[in-house]
Image: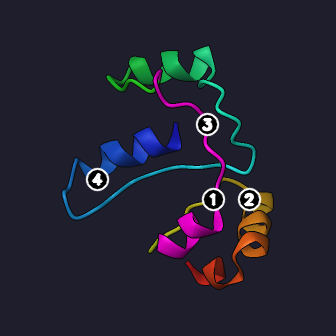
Amino acid sequence: MAEALLRDLVGGRCDLEVDSAGTVGDGTPPPDHAVGVLAERGMDISGRPSRLLTAGDLEAADLIVVMSRQHLVDVATLHPPAWDR
């Protein structure tokens, strides 16, 4: 959901790449409720299964947005140089 909302906010700017991954990415599809809520806003996330965050993702990112303090700890543990992004 966060990826779709941020992608919508930046309005398709070609100089920005928005991607998401999580600490429990196991390839499951998004929950039906999330699909429905975003469909009401004109966004389709039905084909976006969860994906596991990697150190490579963090190394390549200019900005890292977390959804909880535990995610911040997970990011800093996985790739300590990502702490300040």
Count of all numbered marks drawn on residues in the image = 4
Mark 1 in CB contact with mark 3 (< 8 angstroms): no
Task: Indicate the amino acid at tag 1.
Answer: Val
Q: Position of residue 46 (x, y in %)?
A: 47, 21
Residues in magenta, as a range: 46-60
Work out whether residue 65 or residue 19 is closer to the camera in this orientation and state it: 19
Dot 2 or dot 3, earlier in sequence = 3
Mark sitting earlier along the chain (1/4): 4
- Is 73 above or below relative to 22? below
Classify mark 4: helix, strand or loop: helix
| Mark 2 crowd level (few <14, some 14–19, many ≥20, 10 Å Cα) | some
User: What whole-number distance in Å separates the C-alpha atoms at marks 4 and 2?
Assistant: 23 Å
**Prevailing secondary structure class for the magenta stretch in the rendered image:** loop
- Residue 40: mark in rendering: none
Reading the chain from its start, which is encountered first: label 2 or label 1? 1
Magenta region includes residue 52 = yes
Q: Are marks 2 and 1 in contact (CB under 8 Å)?
A: yes
Q: Does the CB distance between marks 4 and 2 fall below 8 Å?
A: no
Q: Which residue is the site of mark 2?
A: 71
Position of residue 8 in the picture relative to residue 65 (left or right): left
- Inter-mark Cα distance, 2 to 3: 15 Å
- Identify residue for label 3: 50
* Whether residue 42 is situated above or below residue 56 in the rendered picture: above
